[in-house]
Every structure is written in C-alpha cells, then in structure tokens.
Image (cartoon, grey):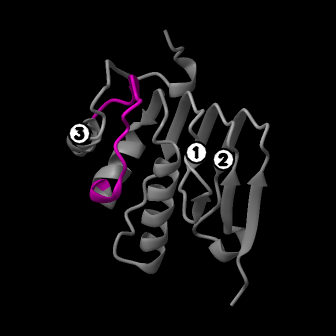
Amino acid sequence: MMEQKVLHISVASLKRLSITNSKIYSCKPKIYSCKLKISAPNLQSLTYNGMPEDVHTDQTFSSIVDADIDITFQDVRYTEKGKERQCGLKNLLGGISDVKILHVSGSTLLTLYYEDIFTQMPTFHDLRRLVVSSELRLSMYVGLLRLLLILPNVESVVITQASPSSLSSP
C-alpha cells in the first residue's frame, strides 16, 4: 500500500485559488491521489474542478466572495472511496459556506443529489447569487431544490447553458 501524499496550501495572502483535480480513475488511481489541506484565511475566489476526495480546510474562508465549483460526478456512494468523496465534498462546501456568489455545474448538482450530503451541509447565509451552468435534467432539478433549501438569503438564481467562468457577476 502506497502512503498518501499531502499537498498543504498555506498562504495567508492568497486571494485566488484554482484547483483542477483531473486524475485518471481507470489507471492506478492511488499514484495520483493526495490529501489536500487548504489554509488561506484571505481567500476571495476559489475555482475547483474535479472530485474532492480528501479535502480539508483549516477554517471557513470568511473573506470569500465567489466560488466556481464543478464537481465531476461519479456514483460510488457505497464504497470506501465514496465515503472519502462525501467527506471531501462536505469539507469543500463547508469551507466556502460564507461565499457571496456561487457558480455550480450540472454535474455538481448531480453529485449533490446522489451523494446525499445535505443533512451534513452548512447553511449558506451570505450567498446572494447562484449561477447554475447546465441544461438541467430531473435529478439535477432535485439537487438544485435541495441546494436552494440551504440558501435562505439568495436574491438571484441564474440558470444558463454557458460555462460558469464565462458569466460575470453584476
């Protein structure tokens, strides 16, 4: 068994962070996996693409303004890897619970629906604008409705087929 490596991002002055987790799952996934620890108290913008398997944040990013989350959907709920993904997803979303503008993809909504972590998710009290970039299917609508339940102060919801990064905030 290979020891898991840790990538620790600890930069107090970091304002923008973009993470792409595009490992190949069919080809020796243990080689590419690592635990991701983030400590960035002044983070204002986060872009995350992929599946957060083992993500830990030292605190919520209270200064975060916008986040663009594109979770790669993989239905592995009942496996050990699925439990890691649920924990990583819960930690990632918990870390950005103070965000003001949130961009999510349709695959993120699918993941939220199938991973069934809504009972463990924080409420996004500060979120004012939600942008969903996808042509929605039935399970995505259910994921969107579940997400809206934890957004008590949302003022604007935009659903578009454009990619989230091409949308500008008002």
SS at badge 1: strand
In the image: residue 66, left or right of residue 111: right
Please tell me whether residue 133 belongs to the stretch shown in magenta. Answer: yes
Marks 2 and 1 sit apart, C-alpha to C-alpha, by 5 Å
Q: Earlier in the sequence, mark 2 or mark 1?
A: 2
SS at badge 2: strand
Three-letter residue code for mark 1: Asn
Q: Residue at (52%, 52%) from the top-left corner?
A: 92
Q: Quadrant of residue 116?
A: bottom left
Return the mark for residue 20.
2
Q: Is residue 134 above or below residue 3?
A: above
Label 2 close to label 1 by CB (< 8 Å): yes
Q: Is residue 68 above or below residue 76?
A: above
Please tell me whether residue 14 belongs to the stretch shown in magenta. Answer: no
Q: Residues within 10 Å of mark 2 (few under 14, many from 20)?
A: few
Marks 2 and 3 sit apart, C-alpha to C-alpha, by 28 Å
Q: Earlier in the sequence, mark 2 or mark 3?
A: 2
SS at badge 3: helix
In the image: residue 146, left or right of residue 25: left
Three-letter residue code for mark 3: Leu
Image x and y of residue 26, in percent = 58, 69
Image x and y of residue 8, in percent = 75, 60
- Disc 1 target residue: 49
Three-letter residue code for mark 2: Thr
Identify which residue, 70 or 41, lies in the foreground.
Answer: 41
Q: Quadrant of the N terminus?
A: bottom right
Region in magenta: 118-136
Return the mark for residue 149.
3
Marks 1 and 3 sit apart, C-alpha to C-alpha, by 24 Å
**Which circle, 1 or 3, is nearer the viewer?**
3
Q: Earlier in the sequence, mark 1 or mark 3?
A: 1
